[in-house]
Amino acid sequence: MALPDADRLDAWRSFLTAHAAMNKMLSRALEEDEGLQLPWFEILDALAMSDEKSLRFNDLAERVMTNPSSLSRQIDKLEDKQYVAREKSVADDGRAIVLVLTPTGHDVWKSASTTYYRIVRRVFTSWLTETDVVALHRVFSKVLEAE
């Protein structure tokens, strides 16, 4: 199997390095400012951004791009802190379980989102031109289609 050409491989490595750097900055800021782990914030953010402030387990796992066993452990911890709750779904026959953002969880998310989006804006979005945004959407769409 042939390696990608050097320019494309450099672009890939730059993407990985930038992603790792962003995660490191976000993790550090959330821990220092909010006492919150990045994966916890991502779960709270997914729930806060959903229409009903709740999601089915598999939908949440897909949104935060994690495997179900890891997500289950994270949910247990968030439930212990009363940031999320497991509830029976009212959208079907009541057998399905949805994860719901609690009022406490919403308050934690709201505070943490200020920290999170401050870093995203300072390090990423403020540097992008409209052309960059269009190009990134195009590139990442191609990646997701290839999945």
Image (tube, helix red, strand yellow):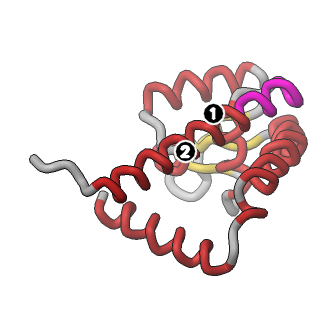
Q: Is residue 69 left or right of residue 40?
A: left
Whole-percent x, y for residue 32 in the image? 85, 25
Quadrant of the rendered structure where residue 38 is? Answer: top right
Is 95 placed above or below 146 here?
above
| Mark 2 vs 1, N-terminal side | 1
Quarter of the rendering occupied by the C terminus: bottom left
How far apart marks 2 and 1 lie (CA) works out to: 8 Å
**In the rendered image, which quarter is residue 111 located in?**
top right
Q: Verify CB contact (< 8 Å) between mark 2 and mark 1.
A: yes
In the image, residue 109 lies at what x, y percent?
A: 81, 42
For the point 73% across and 63% down, the residue is 127
- Local crowd size for mark 2, using a 10 Å CA cut-off: few (<14), some (14–19), many (≥20): some
Is the residue marked by circle 1 packed among few (<14), some (14-19), or many (20+) residues within 10 Å? some
Task: Tell me the SS state at disc 1.
Answer: helix
Pick the residue in front: 96 or 140.
Answer: 140
Magenta highlight: main SS: helix
Pick whichever, 68 or 87, lies toward us: 68
Disc 1 marks which residue?
39
Q: Residue pushed farthest front?
A: 6
Can you say whether 61 is above or below 130 in the image?
Answer: above
Residue placed at 61% from the left, 80% from the top?
A: 131
Please give the name of the residue rendered at 72% of the width and 37% of the height, measured from the top-left corner.
Answer: 26
The residue singled out by tag 2 in the image is 64
The amino acid beneath tag 2 is Val
Is residue 56 shown left or right of residue 41? left
Residues in magenta, as a range: 27-35
Would residue 86 be seen by someone viewing this image from the given angle? yes
Say above or below: 141 vs 18.
below
Q: Nearer the viewer, residue 51 or 18?
A: 18
